[in-house]
Image: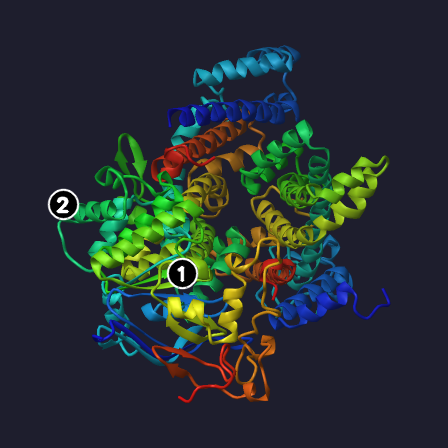
Amino acid sequence: MSDPVLSVKGLSTHFFTRAGVVKAVNGVSFDLARGEIMGLVGESGSGKTVTGFSLLGLVDAPGRIVEGSIKLNGVELTTLSEAELRKRRGHEISMIFQDPIATLNPMLTIGQQMKLAIDAHERVSAAAARSRATELLTQVGIPSAAARLRAYPHEFSGGMRQRVAIAIALLHRPSVIVADEPTTALDVSIQAQILAKMRALARETGTAMVWISHDLAVVSSLASKLAVMYAGRIVEEGPTATLLRDPRHPYTAGLIASLPAMAKPGAPLNQIAGSTPSLLSLPEGCPFSPRCTHASGQCTTDADMTQNGGRQWRCFHPVGQTAPEPA
Amino acid sequence: MSDTNTPFRRFWTEFRENKVAVFALAVVVTMILLALFASVVSPQNPYDLANLSLMDSRRPPGFVGSGGYTHLLGTDPQGRDLLSAIFHGLRISIQIGLAAGFVSLTIGTALGITAAYLGGRIEALIMRLVDLQLSFPAILLALVMVALLGQGKAQLIGALVAAQYAYFARTAYGAAKAERGKDYIEAALATPLSGRLVVWRHLLPNCTPPLIVVATVQIANSISLEATLSFLGLGLPVTEPSLGMLISNGFPYMMSGRYWISVYPGVALIILIVAINVVGDQVRDQFNPRLRK
Amino acid sequence: MLGFVIQRFLQAVLVMAAMSVIVFCGVYAIGNPIDIVIPPEATQEIREQTIRRLGLDRPLYEQYFIFIGNLLQGDLGRSFVYNIPVLELIGGRLPATLELVLISVISATVLGVSLGIYAGYRPDSWVSKTIMAVSVLGFSVPSFWVGLILILFFAVNLGWLPAGGRGETVEIWGIGWSFPTFDGLSHIVLPAINLALFKLAMMIRLARAGTREVMLTDTVKFARAAGISEGTILWRHLLKLISIPIITVFGLELGSTLAFAVVTETIFSWPGVGKLIIDSIAVLDRPVMVAYLILVAFLFVTINFVIDLVFALIDPRVRHGAAA
């Protein structure tokens, strides 16, 4: 395989609040190949959004990246100055957000907002900027794009606004797009359209994506690889099909079992007992152990990642196996 | 009330954490005490003309006058001991501020709750009027009222009330309206004879925290507004000078360097107003659920 | 858009009519003007003549319609004291007040918004904390006291600036203005600071609150994620997003500053409308009081109407009738 376009190693982002240190992201590692779509799945509060912001260097105070490495196209991002980071944001790596109503500025036209995003990285004429903006709006599926440049966000539907946001994220053909639940706020039918569009765009442009979601069903239809996060850590990672068919980590298994599609009609949905631990005071060892039916005394110590055939997990008692395989 | 964990006690525990606010509260209490016992702590009765001698007028701080004692803060153009005049002036200012504050509170709350409780046309009428009035600056309304009513203590309080009741009405209305919309009130109202109960048990208590906050701020505003009106010569009669009047009396002499006649009463006024505002800020923060941990 | 303008215009006219009734009743129904304009030693004949001349013998509602009729013709009566048309009297004083008010409100807005944005952008820096502390003072210290201290400090102790009057004025369009001359400008500095301080504090708080709120929104995060620089975010995104409350308050403050000018003009002997109204209240010169109140009400209503129009121009949601 060629060099990964994005390589994250041991990333930890902590928030230094008055109540204590919140370990939102705690030693996250993954690689992303060119054009690859990775689903980053977890409950709210599992640290997936903070991971996304960390990748762009956009963690708000009192949070900061305390350790780890983020290499984008071979360049280490964590040691870059703010000015250098800014040059890469929107250019090599961009981000789209959950709520398209909140992301676009209601007081500026779509054209103005796209021009600002172009100007952030290149000096181009107004005409050139217009044609680039039109081209991208067309590409994300906005009809009569040239005319729509003069429209304001409120004149678009939610789905169309999200397409505009995607077009802005794509303006400079970034290598990576971090998509933070971009379809959660949309109707199911619109959601499917956007998913299809994103998959096509990733294929056409070679843009890799980190697709953050709490919805395993949505991500698995899109991503070729899944990473499951729990309490600031990736607990399991692997190709989507393998992981869904044969999960190793009990948490992953629980997530899959609780999918409505997995339940027999009329039978109650499976659920994972208990709730996510407070990130202020994580239990010793595996943070999932208090909710885990497989837990033993061993689980109060940290498990290493077990690597096996292109997938990995962090558990002493993986599901579907009687004993941990040797590393 | 004998419970050790009364709301008041909890409130005080939290209040105590802000040292600045505690200090400000101490200042307010001291000033109220000074005002209450003005005739005891003052070296002179500033309203007794027999006590005053023109020989002593406009003397600088530290001057020993015909009364045989030192005028610590100097004397005013009538020969009053400024310190005594300030204590007595403080009394008038606080009196008027409190009186105007409480009358506005009563009238405003009654109007606000009536509007929220009755709804319909009466609600629209009251709140339209209140909103229209709120869009005009208080000083202007007070000026008009003073112009209409003439001068004197009662008239002045009337003017201040007219200028301020609308803030209380808005606040009470907002809080009562929010509570009025809840289902249990609708349910309670479905039973006969419960209207009064709803107002006293539910609407009024729900309005209390925001009203206390508005009241502290408005008492400070009343004192400030009274001082402003007196300074403009539209307040109280000269015989019983409030702080504003004392400042006004000294103003013409400021140009010739006799600063103390205006400055010391002014300092007393500022300390009082700022201290009340600091206390008010703390109370507001404590009542604001959004700022709570 | 046109419907919106017409609706707001009718609303403004309605408020104006209500105001004229309130002002008229307030001033004409309470207090007895006859005692003020007619000297007590006047004969019965002179008394009746004067009463008839001023229309004080008619029923109140008739007086009101005479008043409105005259008002619409631009005739607001004659001052009891100066015995010249009130409009002329006020018109002669208005430029001085407008000059003072405009300079104060505009400089307070420009400065206050800049400081407020800074304080909201870097809320934890000591500069921001200083700005906020000063704004608290600007709020709680009565304006007449600030004026006094300004005079004591800059005029009496330092002797840098004059303490009162308008100084040298220049005629533009037949009206005298202070700001074009150095002397006039030096006279306007202290009263303008005095008048501006409260507005400054208010603008700082408003801009700070708006900035803090906007900087946490996804709009700003998204702009940052697109690599847009902080300067552009502040200048292009933030300023537009916080402009609506700021313009509202700017308009309202323009009106209330006209009223507050009463205090400042008295302290600094600024020969404007405010000083005139104080003097008129002292001697119960009713036509001047009525005209002043009507004028202020008119300015308020006009300003509010203009602000509604400005909203429609700058906020695309209002312009397209999307927002309620």
Compared with C87, C96 (above or below) is below
B49 vs C159, nearest the viewer: C159
Residue A178 visible? The answer is yes
Q: Position of residue A38 (x, y in %)?
A: 34, 66
Q: Position of residue A243 (x, y in %)?
A: 42, 70
Residue C163 visible? The answer is no
Q: Amino acid at mark 1?
A: Val
Question: Residue A127 shows which numbered tag?
Answer: 2
Q: Quadrant of residue A83?
A: bottom left
Left/right placement of residue C156 relative to residue B273 reads: left
Q: Residues within 10 Å of mark 1 (few under 14, many from 20)?
A: many
Question: Residue A261 shows which numbered tag?
Answer: none
Which chain letter matches label 2? A
Q: Residues within 10 Å of mark 2 (few under 14, many from 20)?
A: few
Q: Position of residue A206 (x, y in %)?
A: 22, 62
Residue, disc 1: A219
Q: Amino acid at mark 2?
A: Ala
- Residue at x 40% of width, y 60% of height: A219
Compared with B220, C260 (above or below) is above
Q: Position of residue C103 (x, y in %)?
A: 36, 45
- Residue at x 36% of width, y 57% of height: C220
B248 vs A188, nearest the viewer: A188
Left/right placement of residue C155 relative to residue A205 reads: right
Q: How is the image coloured?
A: rainbow
- Residue at x 64% of width, y 70% of height: B23
B4 vs C262, nearest the viewer: B4
Left/right placement of residue A53 relative to residue A18 reads: left
